[in-house]
Amino acid sequence: MIVIMEENATEEQITKVVDRLVNEGFDIHRSTGARHTVLGAVGARMTDSREYELLEGVHEVVRVSSPYKLAARAFKPEGTKVKIKDVIIGGEKVVMMAGPCTLENREQIEAVAASVAKQGVQIMRGGAFKPRTSPYSFQGLGEQGLKMMREAADRHGLLTVSEIMDSTQIPMFIRYVDILQVGARNMQNFNLLKDLSKLDKPILLKRGPAATIEETLLSAEYIMSGGNHQVIICERGIKTFETYTRNTMDIAAIPVIKKLSHLPIVADPSHATGRRDKVPPMARAAVAAGADGLLIEVHNEPERALCDGAQSLLPEQFDKLMEQLRLIAPAVDRTI
Amino acid sequence: MIVIMEENATEEQITKVVDRLVNEGFDIHRSTGARHTVLGAVGARMTDSREYELLEGVHEVVRVSSPYKLAARAFKPEGTKVKIKDVIIGGEKVVMMAGPCTLENREQIEAVAASVAKQGVQIMRGGAFKPRTSPYSFQGLGEQGLKMMREAADRHGLLTVSEIMDSTQIPMFIRYVDILQVGARNMQNFNLLKDLSKLDKPILLKRGPAATIEETLLSAEYIMSGGNHQVIICERGIKTFETYTRNTMDIAAIPVIKKLSHLPIVADPSHATGRRDKVPPMARAAVAAGADGLLIEVHNEPERALCDGAQSLLPEQFDKLMEQLRLIAPAVDRTI
Amino acid sequence: MIVIMEENATEEQITKVVDRLVNEGFDIHRSTGARHTVLGAVGARMTDSREYELLEGVHEVVRVSSPYKLAARAFKPEGTKVKIKDVIIGGEKVVMMAGPCTLENREQIEAVAASVAKQGVQIMRGGAFKPRTSPYSFQGLGEQGLKMMREAADRHGLLTVSEIMDSTQIPMFIRYVDILQVGARNMQNFNLLKDLSKLDKPILLKRGPAATIEETLLSAEYIMSGGNHQVIICERGIKTFETYTRNTMDIAAIPVIKKLSHLPIVADPSHATGRRDKVPPMARAAVAAGADGLLIEVHNEPERALCDGAQSLLPEQFDKLMEQLRLIAPAVDRTI
Amino acid sequence: MIVIMEENATEEQITKVVDRLVNEGFDIHRSTGARHTVLGAVGARMTDSREYELLEGVHEVVRVSSPYKLAARAFKPEGTKVKIKDVIIGGEKVVMMAGPCTLENREQIEAVAASVAKQGVQIMRGGAFKPRTSPYSFQGLGEQGLKMMREAADRHGLLTVSEIMDSTQIPMFIRYVDILQVGARNMQNFNLLKDLSKLDKPILLKRGPAATIEETLLSAEYIMSGGNHQVIICERGIKTFETYTRNTMDIAAIPVIKKLSHLPIVADPSHATGRRDKVPPMARAAVAAGADGLLIEVHNEPERALCDGAQSLLPEQFDKLMEQLRLIAPAVDRTI
């Protein structure tokens, strides 16, 4: 922690800050510049830096250590590869995860599974429990849906990913699902994160709509600190003043997280934009920016979808997108 | 729902939209203006308006019904008063809720309870389970803390409010706590909201840092739709580009929610600003803008607080604030 | 400037950073902690701290000096009072500035001037050149308007404030207007700021909708650095994801700017909210938070206003607001 | 304009709204649904829709016509191509604009011009007048810089683009510069926009950091409404709560503006991110999302740049980026 004193701080004020730091067990390095005195406080203890900001004569306090350790790039400079059977997330291949927003019935699930498997998708996505903003919307098929998706996925050689809503669902999800997804609205549901940290299952952690990159990595740290290091980050847009798209997809977060962390990062253009016609350009942008994978909503009959049909691609639109992505991947030394 | 066609929409495009609306069970009113054709679609069914926005020739689609009903002012124009024993939230008196961020030990709890009770506070606040952004921070005293707060509150004739983290804690909270608080990060934890909707206990619902006013009222609707109409909204700041304060406190949300909804609204300047020296001005501003109550952190020794000491007022600062608030309340026809 | 190295930075990387800093003329203080090496760079020269962030092995770079000097509280700890005739902005009295958004005709100007003067307002506001978002909106009366406002103001013993659009208008404004207002959209029109810095006239500088507090104070610094120290800051709302109100009024900016700077700060609830019914609560909140003055739109016939009638108070609403503010002012040791 | 009445609006309230609309010259279409009465108001006159929102019994008012006409896609469905000599912006080829942030001296200008021309860049960028946030930063070479850039550009067969700061500079810019750039901070400097609207010169209009897409198109409309239809929009990032990058680049704005408007849209990843290492991924993303061109900062010695060196690419980094872009362009049916 570094404490920068005001230009006109008195010696007495400086001494008071130093004494308090020493009391808290810090070693102090003092530099006196032309205008400011700067105190470098070195020590292992965590403290609330804001408390020092409120002391008399203090101009600013800067935290030095990044608050996450296990999620930091330095912890594993070569990068994490999450492996599930023969699928590797964070490797050379950009991994496609596709499927309907909501699992609706056996026909829909089979139709979409067949269609995306044909296109080289490796992981099927589909929601069985839906976090709906309105209590009056369709809330999902539940366990029945997970089971149907598992069967369809197995028929087509796909892995599965689905959103878990709370800790009580863990045993059920472990039975049917390969990657447990933490939704954007649950990104700081710390009780859930702690329970997931005990599992030996990959977790796909979606960035919350108000979460900074640092807060997202701290949520990853929660999961890792319990022993589960198989975390995949997912960029899906943040809340901004621009409301034409549902959220503002922060494409720059992809290379930023690549630099700050060793964890793989994928992107979800379907939820970020909320509009089918904007999904292909943003999917292409994410791959061009270096994403390790994509999460895309595909529906065989989006006009009849029970949820978010407006952001689901038709199978033929998805086919065309795959063609475009195959052209882009080599530009970032990847395959798809 | 109102569908506004593009200026150059063809008759064929218009017919296609009309047919689809009719198929979905809507009655259609068509107006043809100088430039635009406008379709008014009347019907009870919920539909995804974005789906229509993607149709050829459509310029914009406007949802007419507000998505919340029970939380809307029209549902109870005279306003809701949440009554617990002799305390009324939403009445003429501005209700003060004060106490430490985190319950730490018996001495601290007793000291703060005594100090705030003396100042006319009616409800004691205190966290026993803390949603900490970092997994390495102090996580709270747990049930022991709730029990100690209950005892201290009873000694001083106070009610209590505390944050519940997930549904499994409901039986424990019901035993010790008068008002169950849903934290900002859990505002869209819909499973939790649904479980709370079955209780006969007041819920204090904090606005999420990325939640619009409409989304906040929809979360209130979740709780009300299960039968629990004792909901208190709490404004505590939103995420914006301004980072000097922890969040940007949206004081205007207070009169806006008063207009849109019949539910009481209180404000939490401690979490909104994150800095002790900014709490009194924002507390005064909230009351001046019409808040029904305040949630304020007070700590007898903030320098030693285990959590958020930097935003806790000293008892003497709280005393001074109360004096100021007593001067302001009459300007909005309230007492304190 | 402080350069914090990565945990695993090599000695070679550290040396490279030190050499570059020395070459740029900095004195270096090196502290080696348990995990990080920290370099304190002391020197007068301005440099681009981001350039160091890009060097190998660097974790973070922190700028120490605040980029504004003249606008900083330390430059004039007792606070600036802007005096114009017998009006003092930044003193004990909260200064009211009121009038129509747009000057429309002689009758309107006279009616509003008479009405606000009767209520103790000291400064009349009114726009003669309007920065309209749409080129098809009414663009203002021009010089004729300024002249009419001057005459009406003189009849009623009022000072005047009006928005200047560019440097070519300076001679005209000096003739008619007491306080030159820089609009939010011009807050970083640096050529204009430089020209205003040469004048001996008070400047009311509105915070831009995307401007941080620091950027706002840097714009004040531009005006001060040319010699004009009579700057009044004005908070009028920032752009956020909440769109119910036109902007989100950042009431906390009032006490924050009071702490960081010696300049007076006023608030404009009319432009911040864009809705007449939200102006009184936000005006009360601003005074309760410590604003040195208010800028309020008042119109004798808002339904016929040529611009922003929806946010103008009727004279009787303004009267009622003044009564409320007179009750609130003593809570912050002010009069009104 | 569509006025949606409250569910419990009285017949008297409805009549009052209708009367006022009729008085303002609107034709009214009334639909009465199960819950709401909806009034469709058809007419040519512009009115302030917020005024109606404040009437008793009104739930919401929706503006139907988009406020921009000339900039709307419907005005020129086939898309605008801005042609300057043999360069076409908005055609099949993605147009590269590259050069230093600031023009510094003859050697620098020549070195960069030679380097980018070799890579197939068609337009050289370079600032001669810099809008610096701090009054103490280097403010640019002025006319001398424009002249040197003109000569270097001519030697290498390049066109030029440079930022104009105010209307008084128009004659000078016309002499030396092919495309006049309006900076982000000037996007709503309406006096400047009006003066540019009289020219027969292409204008590159940067989106402001707090400007919605609609506001950006309204600023384009300002320029077009005076007769100058050669407008190029530029996405360069918006202000959000995420501060790791300087701004959050809104890549989705590219396909959105393509849909809403016929004007070409280019992207500036250098200013959007503010960090050299994030420029290539965001440049690739912008092209993958469909941008018509890129504006990139390149400097032969970025470590010595007088401004924004940290975001300038080295010539060899730019070469590598061009290779990547050539692979990506075919995915969106473009060349580069």
Image: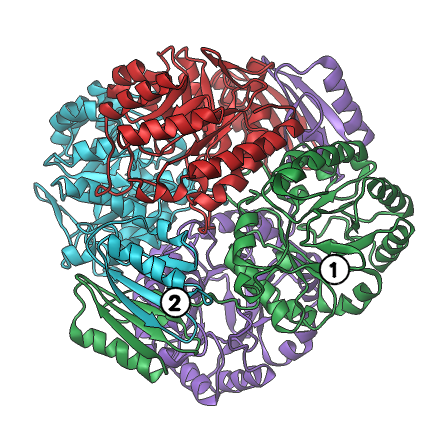
Chain colours: A purple, B green, C red, D cyan
The structure residue drawn at horizontal position 44% and vertical position 86%, both measured from the top left corner, is: A110
Specify whether B286 is left or right of B41: right
Mark 2 Cα-neighbour bin, 10 Å: few <14, some 14–19, many ≥20: many
Tell me the number on the disc at residue B83. Answer: 1
Q: Is residue C110 above or below residue D86?
A: above
On the rendered image, what quadrant is the N terminus of chain C found in?
top right
Residue B195 or residue D267, whichever sits in front: B195
Give D237 or A158, whichever is nearer the viewer: D237
Q: Is residue D233 visible to us here?
A: yes
Q: Quadrant of the C terminus of chain C?
A: top right
Circle on res. A336: 2
Name which quarter of the figure residue B185 lies in: bottom right
Q: Nearer the viewer, mark 1 or mark 2?
A: 1
Residue at the image position 57 percent from the left and 68 percent from the top: B70
Q: Position of residue C25 (x, y in %)?
A: 50, 15
Q: Is residue A226 visible?
A: no
- Are there few (<14), some (14-19), or many (20+) residues within 10 Å of tag 1? few
Mark 1 belongs to which amino acid?
Answer: Lys
Q: Secondary structure at mark 2?
A: loop
Helix, strand or loop at disc 1?
Answer: strand
